[in-house]
Amino acid sequence: MPIDDATQAAVRALWEAGARHGRAPAPVPEADPWEDDVQGAERSPVVVVLAGTPDLEVRLHRDGLDEVHVEDVVTLEVPRRDTAAVVDALLGGGGGRARRRPRVRGLLGNVVAALVGSPAPSDLEVRVGDGDAARVHRAQVVVRHPMSGWLLSLPLAED
């Protein structure tokens, strides 16, 4: 069964976002034509990879709730209507739309965080839309070593 129209449109939007920033995605494989919905097995997501800095992997799910994996340290769950905009904001170097929000403040908080093994306990926030229609997608930065230099270079969010 071929990829549905909504997913095809999302893949095209992701390719356009990548092209705007000089980051063509890796080729997207076609869906398995022998896969049968009647068998009850849920189809795996369509994956679009935009290698580089930041390294992005977008998983387009059939239910329209997609995942944007950033540098293997953050997974944003994004509704389909915002997926391309989130990727565009991340590829644009943030452009003020992508920020880290620290989870701890002050010297003592950072010392304790470092002692428990989290050098930068924070959330990634990506704002899409403007004015009253603006939406913020947020996810916790999961510590992995080595830590992403791109992610740490994002400006911190103001309170």
Image (spheres, rainbow, N blue to C red):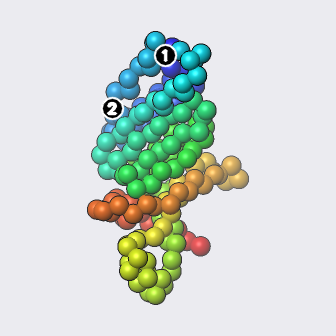
Mark earlier in primary sequence (1, 2): 2
Rate crowding at label 1 as few (under 14), some (14 to 19) or many (20 or more) other CA atoms within 10 Å: few
Q: Is residue 14 left or right of residue 150?
A: right
- Looking at the image, residue 92 lies above or below residue 43: below
Query: Disc 1 on helix, strand or loop?
Result: loop
The picture quadrant where one finds residue 143 is bottom left
Kindly identify which numbered label has been placed on residue 35.
1
Tell me where residue 128 appears, x and y as whole percent: 58, 49
Q: What residue type is labelled 1?
A: Glu
* Quadrant of the snapshot with the C terminus: bottom right
Q: Is residue 25 left or right of residue 59?
A: left
Q: Which of 36 and 124 is in front in this view?
A: 36
Residue at (48% x, 29% y) in the render: 44
Q: Is residue 45 visible?
A: yes
Query: Disc 2 on helix, strand or loop?
Result: loop
Tell me how far mark 1 sits from mark 2, CA to CA: 23 Å
- Looking at the image, residue 43 lies above or below residue 76: above
Residue matched to label 2? 26
Residue at (43% x, 60% y) in the render: 142
Residue at (58% x, 22% y) in the render: 40
Q: Nearer the viewer, residue 132 or 149?
A: 149
Rate crowding at label 2 as few (under 14), some (14 to 19) or many (20 or more) other CA atoms within 10 Å: few
Q: What residue type is labelled 2?
A: Ala
Q: Can residue 96 be seen in this view?
A: no
Q: Nearer the viewer, residue 74 or 84?
A: 74
Residue at (56% x, 56% y) in the render: 138
Q: Is residue 126 left or right of residue 58?
A: right
Q: In this view, does 25 lie to the left or right of 140?
A: left
Tell me where residue 117 appears, x and y as whole percent: 37, 73
